[in-house]
């Protein structure tokens, strides 16, 4: 199964570790630090540059996405 994030980005669903809501997850400092470190290591991929609503963690990258988690959940089924 594949998950379409938008643009030209499609992820194989078995490679996805987690899908997180940007608003609720980034309240925690540890999450902000994790995302900041990934950005510095050039492991962050922006689906597009609209307001991010979620991020998807895979084994090697983090995808920042303008779709909310409910939309991504519906697309995964």
Image: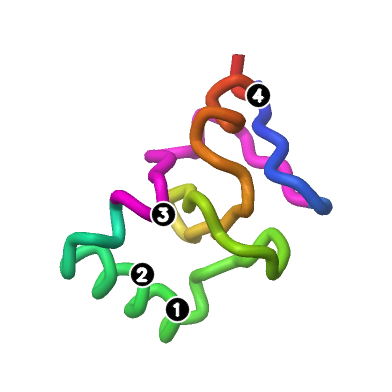
Q: Secondary structure at mark 1?
A: helix
| Pointers 2 and 1 in contact (C-beta within 8 Å) | yes
**Disc 2 to disc 1, C-alpha distance:** 6 Å
* Dot 1 alpha-carbon crowd within 10 angstroms: few under 14, some 14 to 19, many 20 or more: some
Toward the right, the furthest residue is: 8
Q: How is the image coloured?
A: rainbow
Which residue position is annotated with label 2?
Answer: 35
Q: Secondary structure at mark 4?
A: helix
**Disc 1 to disc 4, C-alpha distance:** 26 Å
Residue 12 position within the rendered picture, expressed as x and y whole percent measured from the top left: 62, 34
Tell me which numbered mark, 2 or 4, is placed earlier along the sequence.
2
Q: Looking at the image, is 50 positioned above or below residue 58?
A: below
Which residue position is annotated with label 3?
Answer: 22
Point 67% across, 28% down: residue: 2
Tell me which numbered mark, 4 or 3, is placed earlier along the sequence.
3
Point 37% across, 54% down: residue: 23
Q: Main secondary structure of the magenta part?
A: strand
Magenta-colored span: 9-24
């Amino acid at each position: 199964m594949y998950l379409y994030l938008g643009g030209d980005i499609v992820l194989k669903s078995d490679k996805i570790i987690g899908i997180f809501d940007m608003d609720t997850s980034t309240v925690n400092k540890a999450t902000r630090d994790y995302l900041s470190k990934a950005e510095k290591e050039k492991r962050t991929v922006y689906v597009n540059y609209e307001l991010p609503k979620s991020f998807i963690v895979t084994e090697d990258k983090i995808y920042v996405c303008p779709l909310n988690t409910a939309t991504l959940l519906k697309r995964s089924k």
